[in-house]
Image: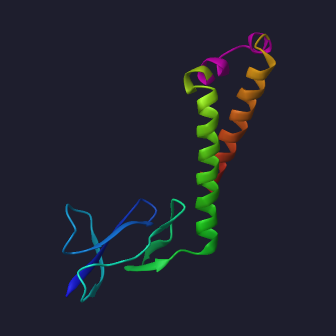
Amino acid sequence: MYKKLIKIDDQNRVISATTSDFATGEGWIEVGEQESRHWRVSIFTGGVCLYKLADGKMVERTDEEIMHDTEINNALSELSQLDSKMARENEDIISSMTETQFNKLPKYRQDLYNEKQAKREAYLLLIKA
């Protein structure tokens, strides 16, 4: 018999799954046994964890939990796309400007900065929910 092992993140989401025959390192949690040395389980879809550890068992996450993580990933992706247009260092410089200095920036820079700030605030609200 082979032990079924998982690793979890700080929110108990399953981020890795294998059997005792392939596990290396520490931090694995046993969630069962099976006869096969290979455990085939899809634990992600679109970068979102499908399972969590609950009461010592690997269980499916709810649709709401999966949707929430999907929204977070989408918001982070939008921020990353904006980062390619405006580096974080430039964003920090602009945020330290006075209103007069800010108003002297080209309109497209002001709009990009405002859009990025709004996306960042929305992302932070999502991860705090």
- Left/right of residue 9 with respect to residue 82 in the rendered view: left
Q: Is residue 9 visible?
A: yes
Q: Position of residue 54 (x, y in %)?
A: 44, 77
Q: Is residue 118 magenta?
A: no
The front one of 5 and 41 is 41
Q: Position of residue 64 (x, y in %)?
A: 64, 70
Quadrant of the frame with the N terminus:
bottom left
Residue in view at x 58 percent, y 39 percent: 80
Residue in view at x 47 percent, y 73 percent: 51
Q: Is residue 97 magenta?
A: yes
Q: Position of residue 91 (x, y in %)?
A: 62, 24
Q: Compared with residue 93, is residue 53 higher up or lower down, i.e. above or below?
A: below
Q: Compared with residue 64, is residue 37 higher up or lower down, i.e. above or below?
A: below
Extent of the magenta region: 91-103
Q: Position of residue 72 (x, y in %)?
A: 61, 53
Query: Which scheme is used to colour this image of the protein?
Result: rainbow
Locate residue 62: give its quadrant. Answer: bottom right
Q: Is residue 124 visible?
A: no
Q: Main secondary structure of the magenta part?
A: helix
Residue in view at x 64 percent, y 65 percent: 67
